[in-house]
Image (cartoon, rainbow, N blue to C red):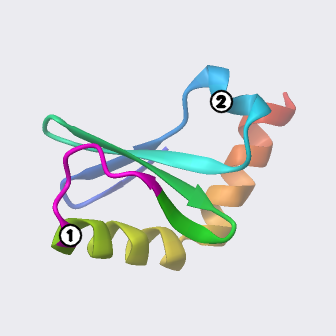
Amino acid sequence: MLRIGAYRFFFYSSDGGEPIHVHVEKENNLAKIWVDPVRLQNSGGFNRPEIRIILSIVQDHQIEIMEAWNDYFSG
């Protein structure tokens, strides 16, 4: 869905019944971020400075992520 630097942002196909969120992967770390409002659900091994970066990226791309979610799960 979205790649910024070393971070890959994506959805799982089974996530459609949950509130809008995005998974973030880098190396062996995998976090889950709620999108509206933007907040951490699970840090998945990321440290605090990286979580701040990830939350900032999600905030900056919130509309894009929400539109992608709606497109992905409406079909």
Q: Residue at x 28, y 74 (%)?
A: 53
Residue furthest toward the top? 14
Q: Which residues are magenta?
A: 41-48
Where's residue 18, x and y in %? 73, 38
Residue bearing the label numbered 1: 48
Judged from the image, the secondary structure of the residue bearing numbered disc 1 is helix
Q: Amino acid at mark 1?
A: Arg
Q: Is residue 36 left or right of residue 74?
A: left
Which mark is on residue 15? 2
The rendered magenta stretch, by its main secondary structure, is classed as loop
The image quadrant of residue 55 is bottom left
Q: Residue at x 52, y 67 (%)?
A: 39
Image height of 10 relative to 63, above or below: above
Decide: few, some or many residues near mark 1? Use Cα within 10 Å; few <14, some 14-19, many ≥20: few
Q: Residue at x 28, y 43 (%)?
A: 44
Q: Residue at x 62, y 22 (%)?
A: 13
Judged from the image, the secondary structure of the residue bearing numbered disc 2 is helix
Decide: few, some or many residues near mark 2? Use Cα within 10 Å; few <14, some 14-19, many ≥20: few
Q: Is residue 74 left or right of residue 21?
A: right
8 within the magenta span? no
Q: Earlier in the sequence, mark 2 or mark 1?
A: 2
Q: CA distance from mark 2 to mark 1?
A: 25 Å
